[in-house]
Image (cartoon, grey):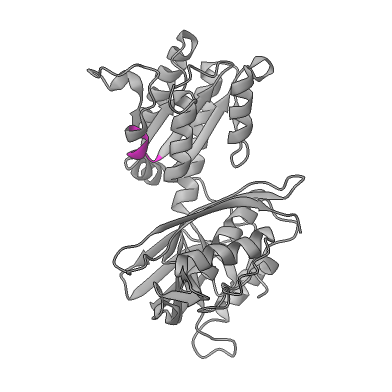
Amino acid sequence: MALSVDTSGTAPRPDPHSLAAWAGDQRIFISSVMADDMAPLRTRLAGVVESLGAEPVWFEAFGGRDDDAEVAYLSEVDSSSVYLGILGRTYGRLDKTTRMSATHAEYRRAEQQGLSVSVWVSGEDDVQADQKAFIDEVRTFHTTGSFSDADDLAEGVRRRLTQMAASALSPWVNLGGTVFRAREIRDDGATVTIQATVHSPQVLADIEAMRPGSSNSREPRLTYSGRSWPVRVQHVTTRTTTARSTEVDIELERRKDAGSSWMGMTFSVGGTTYTSDQLAERDLRQMLFGEEDQSNVLSLGGRIRDFTADLPTGGVSTDVYQAVFALLLTEALVESGRAMRATRVLVSPLGPRGRNLSLEWVGHSNRGDRPTTCSLSGVMPAR
């Protein structure tokens, strides 16, 4: 499947009303060691978060608790939507059970829970060994910011939170192999309406070709935000606003996904029973990491489509590559019937060994009475 990607589709800066609406739904966890030099930075960041209209979640505001300041507040991380970490030269006191600092444990929990992550580093030339390892771990999947003083940090965090709002308000969409950013997606369970600003002439032409009655009209899949369905295009309306962009409204009818008919089934071969979730993990390990599987069970119930050949091979930014990877993985998993939705897709920049992946999706229990959470991590070799 040849993809058509609107690589110029950067998320527009949100207007004040949209930014305030986004911020009003955010709980932002502020994480750092509790050293004296961090106190003014934490206070300053709490003020930045509040000025945007979001809720800062930080130790100083918990009040009345008997817990030590160096205890990891994992329950507070669980109820937050953004992890905001400040890393200086000091790693922090080790917890006797986890052998990690509270800040490190909170970061790990934020990763597990799928929070948006923003980490800022200062004094990197003179950090403890454990702290250096922690920073390197964060940089596997996230770009860290640096700062020189409280003003610099406050401005950087304000800018980063605004970027997070822009991305959240402009989700990437894959409609039948045509990838672009949407300004708004409305879904009532039967009809999905997408509003977008398209910059690429090729992407615009591909969308217009989906109009009912056109020679290339078809029933594509719609994939965004970890979800995917087959759809039927009902209407496509375009409005040219500038020489470089066109406003597009797309109305889609949701269709039933044929791949869901056997989800949750089990398969027995040679006295061994495999769940759909186990087969999905085996399939992905072979596809993404090149792991050999000699069990001859991967064909049971059908294979997950190998989407890796459709990934961009060059000329796109890391952000675009990560977005396209997440869309293609989600589509392949859901259309195969192996998953209900994808919940976390982390893709690192390309390194000497390839790209680090950390994936999570909602699969199916053996009895089919409740969803299960499946996860997978490893290194996808450079191709």
Q: Position of residue 130 (x, y in %)?
A: 60, 22
Instruction: Give above or below for 336 relative to 142.
Output: below
Q: State the image quarter where residue 251 is shown.
A: bottom left
Left or right position of 287 against 40: right
Q: Residue at x 49, y 28 (%)?
A: 104
* Residue 2 located within the stretch drawn in magenta: no
Instruction: Give above or below for 245 relative to 208.
Output: above
Magenta span of residues:
76-81
Q: Position of residue 59 (x, y in %)?
A: 34, 21
Report the front residue among 2 and 239. Answer: 2
- Judged from this view, the residue extending furthest toward the top is 36
Report the front residue among 362 and 247. Answer: 362
Which quarter shows the C terminus? bottom right
Instruction: Give above or below for 122 relative to 159.
Output: above
Report the front residue among 155 and 120. Answer: 120
- Judged from this view, the residue extending furthest toward the front is 271
